[in-house]
Image (tube, helix red, strand yellow):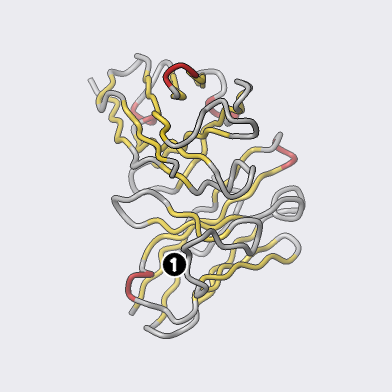
Amino acid sequence: QSMLTQPPSASGTPGQRVTISCSGSGSSIGSNTVSWYQHLPGTAPKLLIYANNRRPSGVPDRFSGSKSGTSASLAVSGLQSEDEADYYCASRDDSLNGLVLFGGGTRLTVL
Amino acid sequence: QVQLQESGPGLVRPSQTLSLSCTVSGASVSSGGSYWSWIRQHPGKGLELIGYIYYDGSAYYTPSLKSRLNLSIHMSQNQFSLRLTSVTAADSAIYYCATHTVTPEPHALDIWGRGTMVTVSS
C-alpha cells in the first residue's frame, strides 16, 4: 500500500494542460523533496522532475513540478500524444527510517 | 554517459534464491556519494524501491524484504548485486537497477537499466 496517493487516471486533449497530484504526509512530502517519473510500457522509467521542480537535462519545459506542504503536483502543458504514459511521484518518509516511497501511479490518457 | 545493465536468470524456483547483477559503465561503483538502487514492478502494478547500497557498502532495505534481501557492491567488476532468498510467486516482477547523477538523493534516479523480468515458478 503506497503512502503517496495519486489519482489512478487523468486525461486531456492535445494542447491542453493537465496536472497530476501526489498527496503525502508531514514526514514524507512535508519533510523531503519530490521526484516525478514517466513510465512507458516496455521501457525503463524516466526521471522528469527532481528536487520538487528541477528538470534533468533533456526533459522538455512542458513538464513542471511544484510542492506545497504535504502535496506535490506535476503539470504537463501543451499535451502531446507521446505523453500518454504512467506517471509516478516519489519521496522519502522520515518516520519510516527514510523509506523511499513511490505513489501508486497515474495513467495519463491523451484523448 | 552512465549506463546500467541487469543480468540474471529469468526463472527461479520457489524457495530458491534470486541473484541479479547490475553492470555499471561510465562510472565507478566506488564513487563517493553514489547510491545504487534496485526497483521492481509487479505485473500491472506500480514501482517499488526494494533497496539501495551506498558506495561504501552500507545498504538500505525496504522493511518488507529486509529479512530476505542482501545487496552488495563488487568493485573489481564494477557491479552491484541483489540476492533475494526464499522467493515465492509474489517476487515475480520486472527488476530494475538504477542510480542518480543529477542529485544525491535515492528517490531521484535518472539512470536506469532496461529491466529484467523474473518469474518464480516450479
Chain designation of label 1: A
**Toward the viewer: B32 or A109?**
B32
Q: Secondary structure at mark 1?
A: strand
Image location (x, y in percent) of residue B92 = 34, 32
User: Which quadrant is home to the N terminus of chain A?
Assistant: top right
Q: Is residue A90 left or right of residue B41?
A: right
Residue A83 in which image quadrant: bottom left
Query: Is B102 in front, or is B98?
Result: B102
Residue appearing at x 41%, y 68% in the figure: A108
Q: Relative to A13, is A92 above or below?
A: above
The amino acid beneath tag 1 is Ser
Horizontal side of B120 relative to B2 (left or right) equals: left
* Labels in figure, total: 1
Q: Residue A17 or A2: which is nearer the viewer?
A: A17
> Image height check: is A80 above or below B93?
below
Give the residue furthest to the left.
B122
Residue A50 is situated, as x and y percent measured from the top left of the image, at 60, 56
Position above or below: A107 against B79: below
Q: Nearer the viewer, residue A38 or B101?
A: B101
Q: Which corner quadrant holds the C terminus of chain A? A: bottom left
- Quick check: A15 left or right of B119? right
The residue sitting at 54% across, 69% down in the picture is A20
Question: Which quadrant of the structure image shows residue B32?
Answer: top right
Picture residue at 41% right of the left edge, 60% below the top: A86
Q: Which residue is mark 1?
A: A9
Can you give x and y, in whole percent of width and height, for residue A81 in the image? Answer: 32, 75
Where is residue B33 shown, x and y percent of the image?
A: 65, 34
Q: Residue at x 56, y 60 (%)?
A: A49
The crowding category of the residue bearing disc 1, from other C-alpha atoms within 10 Å (few below 14, some 14 to 19, many at least 20), is few
